[in-house]
Amino acid sequence: MKRSLISVAAVAALCGLAVQSAWASTVTKFAEAAASKPVPRGLFAVRADVPPGPAEVKAAVETLNKAFADFKAEHSKQLDEIKKGNADALQALKVDVVNAEVGRLQKELDDLNTKIVAAQMGGSGGAVLKDKDYSDAFQSHFKKGEVQASLNKGADGEGGYLAPVEWDRTITDKLKLVSPMRALATVQPVSGAGLTKLFNLGGTASGWVGETAARPATGTGTFASLGFGWGEIYANPAATQQLLDDSAINLEAWLANEVEDEFAKQEGAAYFAGDGTNKPFGILTYVTGAANAAKHPFGAIKLVNSGAAAAITSDGVIDLVYDLPSKFTANARFALNRKAEGTVRKLKDGQGNYLWQPTFVAGAPATLAGFPITEVPDMPDVAANSVPVLFGDFKRTYTIFDRVGVRVLRDPFTNKPFVQFYTTKRVGGGVHNPEPMRGMKVAVNP
């Protein structure tokens, strides 16, 4: 953080001390505030920190809104200079620095909100197991390889064990915090090896007749089936036997943390861009022109052009919002990555109002054109012909299928002195209805 403070101060100095003293003071204050706080370390910061109190969240909201006010002021200056024919590179750099700071503060606020949700889910531990005997047997097997066969709940012949119900649920809940699509989409547990959904394509006809008139046969509706991509996701963490013997840590929590890290990374990519080969079909593969555009009986996810060959425009955002039928807008939201969010933060409507707005309420996301935003690292960057923005009701569009149960195979032989815990879960996914979703393609309107 100190390096960031020096670089920001240097930028301010280059702009001229007489004119830029207020700017330097503002940016320095931002950097000092950031340096005084611990830097979040992804999932581990969420797990380790105490849930934030109301005062901390309120301070974060106020700081974010102050930073956004500074961004609007500097961006307005930049636009005014451009209108005058003066494209000031230093002013543009200032805008980029403040824009990045707004993004950092928004991420910090999102992390605080995540901690609140994690605490509400009981992420700090202490959840009451629904099957204590089974959990004790699982712990014994985890540490020593011992199996209480009389419980008849483990695959002891293979050295494998199905995880306790509550432990399995905890992993799934934690994945919702770090895998955006699990938080957005419908998640459906299934017990079979696969699932096919049947769709009614319509076609049933009717007509008006008199009392004694003949009743000729009418048209009959037709059906079409839709399959989903399936695969097995795995993690293979390891611990020394001495560590397991000493049991100085909560073994279940340790394994759950290792598993969620790996599962979240793999799932995130698959739910957005998976090709269906040993993995789910990603939602982006269903947009017009993509690999699965013709897969769904209802057609592809429709695209709306951004209005520019290599950029997102404010008109493009408005067109995207109003292209979605109103019956799907109640729970609609935007999904885009952080770089794309930095781009749309500069967009204004016809009255000069910024389309992006920071949150004013603890626990609420930032909004774009009045709709919530979810930051998704796996979405593409803004570039010609890319689809960097999705907008719609994700729960009514995409379904994740969880094959019931996480399985753990204890392996003390492959990598001595480590004991590896080969952990697997079968998952599937795909678009079950393309109609509640729209994508933005970076292209000029026809």
Image (spheres, helix red, strand yellow):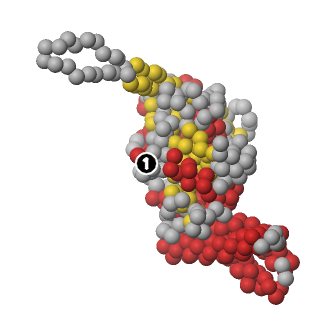
Q: Residues within 10 Å of mark 1 (few under 14, many from 20)?
A: few
Tell whether 433 sits left or right of 203. Answer: right
Tell whether 190 sits left or right of 76. Answer: left
State the SS at label 1: helix
Residue closest to the far right: 14
Q: If the image is split into quadrants, where does the C terminus sit? A: top right
Q: How many marks?
A: 1
Q: If the image is split into quadrants, where does the N terminus sit? A: bottom right
Residue at image location 62% in from the left, 57% down from the top: 314
Residue at image location 43% in from the left, 48% down from the top: 326
Can you give x and y, in whole percent of width and height, for residue 218 in the image?
30, 16
When asked about the image quadrant of residue 224, the answer is top left
Does the image show residue 222?
yes
Instruction: Look at the picture and state if 227 lies above or below 55.
Output: above
Residue at image location 49% in from the left, 26% down from the top: 297
Q: Nearer the viewer, residue 333 or 25?
A: 333
Q: Nearer the viewer, residue 26 or 329?
A: 329
Can you give x and y, in whole percent of width and height, for residue 382 in the image?
71, 50
Tell whether 75 sits left or right of 374. Answer: right
Instruction: Look at the picture and state if 405 lies above or below 381.
Output: above
Q: Tell me the residue that label 1 is attached to.
A: 326
| Amino acid type, callout 1 | Ser
Q: Nearer the viewer, residue 412 or 236?
A: 236
When asked about the image quadrant of residue 348, the answer is bottom right
Residue closest to the far bottom: 18
Can you give x and y, in whole percent of width and height, for residue 280 in the image?
59, 32
Does the image show residue 382?
no
Instruction: Look at the picture and state if 416 lies above or below 64.
Output: above
Can you give x and y, in whole percent of width and height, for residue 147 in the image?
52, 33
Residue at image location 46% in from the left, 55% down from the top: 121
